[in-house]
Image (cartoon, rainbow, N blue to C red):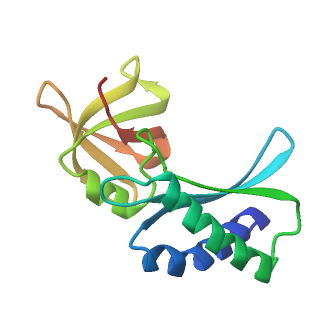
Amino acid sequence: MSKKENYEQKAEAMLEPIISEKGFELVDVEYVKEGGTWYLRAYIDKEGGITIDDCEAVSRAFSEKLDQEDFIEDAYIMEVSSPGLGRPLKKEKDYARSMGKELEIRTYRAIDKQKEFYGILTAYDNNSVTIEMEDGSERTFEKNEIALIRLAFDF
């Protein structure tokens, strides 16, 4: 396991009790380097959406635990935020929640001269995702072909 994955798993384990106590959902944890700075990010959600106060409450509790455990060697910035509208589907619960909803799928390589697809999620498993296209046909994508998958939204 890489250092990055190890940090993410430890942070997720520390966050779970904080999140569940408040009735929130832990969407994702990432440890990434951007512009020379390391970031430990936690994305949280709840029915009706997350507020700034929610993020602050989780951030304070998480910060205290991080100070006690002190398992990250590098200097980093910790952030707690909402995943936002355009969040990608990553976990099984994301797919389950999205059944019957319209998705946007972008593939790494063109399929039938196209890299962007929209359709209603009708099925998924560990390796593939199936959507019903606008014309009524079904198309199945292998997950390793998908660069991005998220709920489609219109403005």
Quadrant into which the N terminus falls: bottom right
In this rendering, the count of numbered labels is 0
Q: Quadrant of residue 4?
A: bottom right
Residue 124 vs 137, above or below: the answer is below
Residue depicted at 31% across the width and 23% down the height: 155
Image coordinates of residue 72 in percent, x first then y, are 82, 70
Q: Is residue 2 rendered to the left or right of residue 53?
A: right
Left or right position of 48 against 39: left
**Residue 118 at x, y = what percent?**
29, 30
Residue drawn at (26%, 45%), measured in percent from left and top?
130
Q: Position of residue 75 (x, y in %)?
A: 88, 59
- Identify which residue is drawn at 67% across, 76% down: 10
Specify the farthest residue to the front.
53
Q: Is residue 124 visible?
A: no
Q: Nearer the viewer, residue 19 or 125?
A: 19
Asked if one can make out residue 63 in the rendered structure from this viewpoint, the answer is yes
Q: Name the residue furthest top.
A: 113
Whether 108 is drawn above or below 19: the answer is: above
Q: Can you tell which quarter of the image residue 111 is in?
A: top left
Horizontally, residue 117 falls left or right of residue 108, namely: left
- Which sits in the foreground, 47 or 102? 47
Location of residue 96 in the rendering, given as x and y in whole percent from the top left corner: 28, 59
The correct choice, above or below, for 20 with respect to 140 in the image is below
Residue found 62% across the figure and 64% down from its top: 59
* Picture quadrant where residue 36 is located: top right
